[in-house]
Amino acid sequence: MAWGIDFNTTLTLMRQEYSSISEVEMQIKEYDKQISDIEIKLKMLISSTPKDIIPDDWKEEPINWLNQNIDEEFTCYQEILIERFKLYQYIEFLKENDKE
């Protein structure tokens, strides 16, 4: 026996306007690229030695610099994932309501 939960929600796409599903899909591709870029940067930060990546003015506090930069990347990563999710939901809404 299968069960599930149905619910309604409101997603807001702030200051965004799309005239077609293909425009939404193009934005999703852009978000995919940004996600990939962040993943590459995080891998670089994780696999590098501090002397290779820490700016001279942060040599006294390399862990703080690294923590700050990784935190910024994760924050951006999370924001992009949320926006991309909203666009996937928007496409689903458009298709379900024949608003292509």
Image: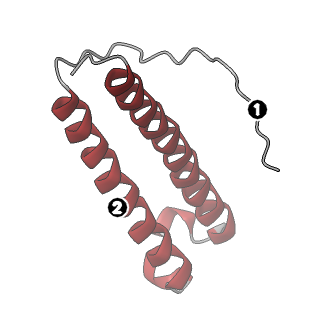
Q: Is the residue marked by circle 2 packed among few (<14), some (14-19), or many (20+) residues within 10 Å?
A: some
Tell me which amino acid carries mark 2.
Asp
Tell me which amino acid carries mark 1.
Ile
Residue 16, by quadrant, is: top left
Q: 64 or 88, which is in the foreground? A: 88
Secondary structure category for the residue under label 2: helix
Q: At 28% from the left edge and 18% from the top edge, which residue is drawn?
A: 98
Q: Is the residue marked by circle 1 packed among few (<14), some (14-19), or many (20+) residues within 10 Å?
A: few
Residue 32, x across and y down, in percent: 33, 53
The tag earlier along the polypeptide, 1 or 2, is 1
Q: 76 or 45, which is in the foreground? A: 76
Quadrant housing the C terminus: top left
Q: 68 or 97, which is in the foreground? A: 97
Left or right side of 78 for 20 = left
Residue 47, x across and y down, in percent: 52, 85
Q: Which residue is mark 2?
A: 37
Q: Is residue 49 above or below residue 91?
A: below
Left or right side of 98 for 52 = right
**Of the residues tagged 1 and 2, which is closer to the observer?**
1
Q: Are dots 1 and 2 in contact, CB under 8 Å?
A: no
Left or right side of 83 for 64 = right
Rounded to the nearest angstrom, the CA distance separating label 1 from label 2 is: 35 Å
Q: Which residue is mark 1?
A: 5
Q: At 57% from the left edge and 14% from the top edge, which residue is drawn?
A: 10
Secondary structure category for the residue under label 1: loop
Q: At 59% from the left edge and 61% from the top edge, which residue is drawn?
A: 65
Numbered label tally: 2
